[in-house]
Image: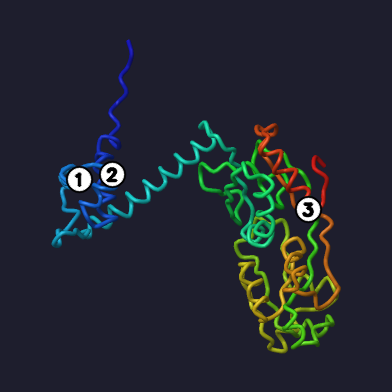
Amino acid sequence: MNKHAPPDQTLLKMPSLRAVKCFVAAARYQSFTRAAETLCVTQAAISRQIRELEEHLDTELFKRVGRSVELTTAGSIFFDAAQLSFINIAQAAARIRKDYGNTSRPTLTLCCSPAFSALWMSHRLPGFFQAHPDIDLNLVTTQNFLSLEPGIQPDVFITKMLSRVRDGYVSRPLFHDRIYPVCSPAYLEAHPEIRTLEGLQDGVLLNLSPYGRSQVAEHVDWGVWLAMHQLDVEDRLRKGLRHFNANDYNLLIQMVLNDQGVTLGWDHLVAPLIAQGRLTRPVEEEVVLEETRHYLAYREDRADDEALIRFKDWFMEQIGLQPGS
């Protein structure tokens, strides 16, 4: 004899999703008429669903103000939760359609850091789209590669993590980090003393802090960089010199472009700005991290996917490596 499943109290206590959908539309537009138009139903149907929801919750959700409606305090609380839930459902449905549905256009989801996205990808993606107009890209940025939003499974990671990204990925080594000071040409002209390491040590240094960067294999800031060249950043503190810290690398680069100081430049990120003449190197000294690399990690189950192969080949060419290497 088959046993019946016990009633699910959570689901039984849930209001009608159709009623919640009507409520969200009415709350968003503050009008039952506009809600009816957006959902392609009658205004009477919207009113009926809202009344059913209010009866279920045993409280009023709207105050009628002339021809429009306003949320009550209870309505605002319910709207915040309901709208977020519908957004999450819509996003999950879109990801499922993309990953598992039948689509006429191949789509790749890429995951990288915000700095790599803004300073590397943004300069090169127009070339990719021109060469591969039939491939759509979905770019996700994060500093925490181990804690992505549930349901996101990128096809490609570009990261400094070799084997810890996720199971089911194949990693290909890319390049070492080359790190050197950068500033704007105008700032260098106004502060010629920073053309030496000693003068640089006393300049306005914009520093990348380690906060929120726990997943990076190592962290190089001004203290580490100067110490590698036998200089002590603590001397600055004794002199009372300004030391600005931020964990947003894009912010630091923008400040440098605005002639506000000197920051450390990661070659793969700042090279395009140097080539354009927007940034310059005040000194020739640099640090090369020979023990670590960046990696391109891609889904093993999509290794034979044509779109993924084309992206990998394009990417390897962009960083000066042979496709398939």
**Label 2's element?**
helix
Earlier along the polypeptide chain: callout 1 or callout 2?
A: 2
Q: Quadrant of residue 221?
A: bottom right
Earlier along the polypeptide chain: callout 3 or callout 1?
A: 1
Which residue carries the number 1 mark? 46
Residue type at the position of mark 2: Leu
The answer to the question of whether label 1 and label 2 lie on touching residues, with beta carbons closer than 8 A, is yes
Pick the front one: 117 or 194: 117
Pick the front one: 92 or 137: 137
Which residue carries the number 2 mark? 39
Q: Quadrant of residue 208?
A: bottom right
**Mark 3 Cα-neighbour bin, 10 Å: few <14, some 14–19, many ≥20:** few
**Disc 3 to disc 1, C-alpha distance:** 56 Å
Image position, residue 318 (x, y; %): 76, 52
Image position, residue 152 (x, y; %): 54, 43
Residue 213 tag number = none
Residue at (63%, 73%) from the top-left corner?
Answer: 254
Image position, residue 199 (x, y; %): 80, 85
Residue 319 tag number = 3
**Colouring of the image:** rainbow
Residue at (82%, 42%) from the top-left corner?
Answer: 325
**Label 1's element?**
helix
Residue type at the position of mark 1: Ile
Pick the front one: 278 or 168: 278
**Disc 1 to disc 2, C-alpha distance:** 9 Å
